[in-house]
Image (tube, rainbow, N blue to C red):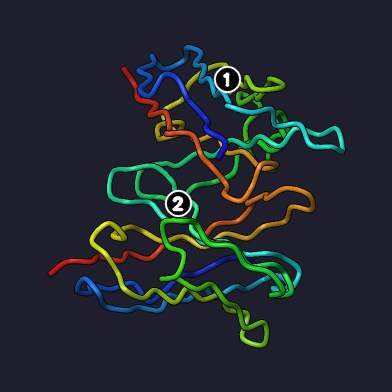
Amino acid sequence: DVVLTQSPLSLPVTLGQPASISCKSSQGLMYSDGDTYLYWFQQRPGQSPRRLIYKVSNRDSGVPDRFSGSGSGTDFTLKISRVEADDIGVYYCMQGPQWPPITFGQGTRLEIK
Amino acid sequence: QVELVESGGDVVQPGGSLRLSCSASGYRFSCCGMHWIRQAPGKGLEWVAVIWHDGSLTYHADSVKGRFTISRDDSKNTLYLQMNSLRVEDTAVYYCARDIGVVSPDLDLWGRGTLVTVSS
């Protein structure tokens, strides 16, 4: 199974400051069609997960442009340019091409300092 | 509006059974594959099972294989998860999710979840 390793697992950030979360895969996530299937989800406290980013760098509708995804191969990053209070929660990466099973990273808890 | 609503969660004893439902609305249910994903209290996300858009194929995680069965009834716009021989470690919030992917799973819509507690 593909293992996704996120770091850090806890991320205290001052409001207005940037934040960065890493997701490293044990196998490459590029499919034979040339696309790379790595996703990011946000789970706010008490809510279900919400897809933020698909195929590495594409923001979902309604996702602020403060959020950006990047990476290739086995190394991926989610960045928030200026953290707002609404961003508090847990962020998960998920891989697609090497399935089943679908696998998720352990999650990174973003909190405000 | 487009949404998924899970139901059926309950408190059940070890060895017991439960059937979860996920009702879809606001889109053509038969378009898409569907998944169950669970989250134990205070833990991360664990994929449980998938069913193809036409019901032709299913996969289950090793942790539930032989005990859980995913199914769908497109006439009722409903996804199911039959859970047998439940264990304490199956305690979790169970989410259903829509899969719009073509070559890879792409979970773009999630329900709010239903809580299953396995305890004596």
Q: Earlier in the sequence, mark 1 or mark 2?
A: 2
Tell me which corner region of the image, top left, top right, bottom left or bottom right, holds residue B90: bottom left
Q: Which residue does the image show at 62% across and 38% down from the upper left?
A: A95
Above or below, B112 against A91 in this view is: below
Q: Are marks 1 and 2 on the same chain?
A: yes
Q: Amino acid at mark 1?
A: Lys
Query: On the rendered image, what quadrant is the C terminus of chain B found in?
Result: bottom left
SS for dot 1 = strand
Above or below, B61 against B28 in this view is: above
Q: CA distance from mark 1 to mark 2?
A: 21 Å
Tell me which corner region of the image, top left, top right, bottom left or bottom right, holds residue A78: top right
For the residue pair B87 and A11, the one nearer the viewer reads as B87
Number of numbered discs: 2
Mark number displayed over residue A48 = 2
Q: Are marks 1 and 2 in contact (CB under 8 Å)?
A: no
Which residue bears the numbered disc 1?
A: A79
* Outermost right residue: A33
The chain letter for the residue carrying disc 2 is A
The chain letter for the residue carrying disc 1 is A
Report the side of B55 relative to A80 (left or right): right
Query: On the rendered image, what quadrant is the N terminus of chain B found in?
Result: bottom right
Graded by Cα atoms within 10 Å as few (under 14), some (14 to 19) or many (20 or more), the crowding at tag 2 reads some
Report the side of B4 relative to B31 (left or right): left
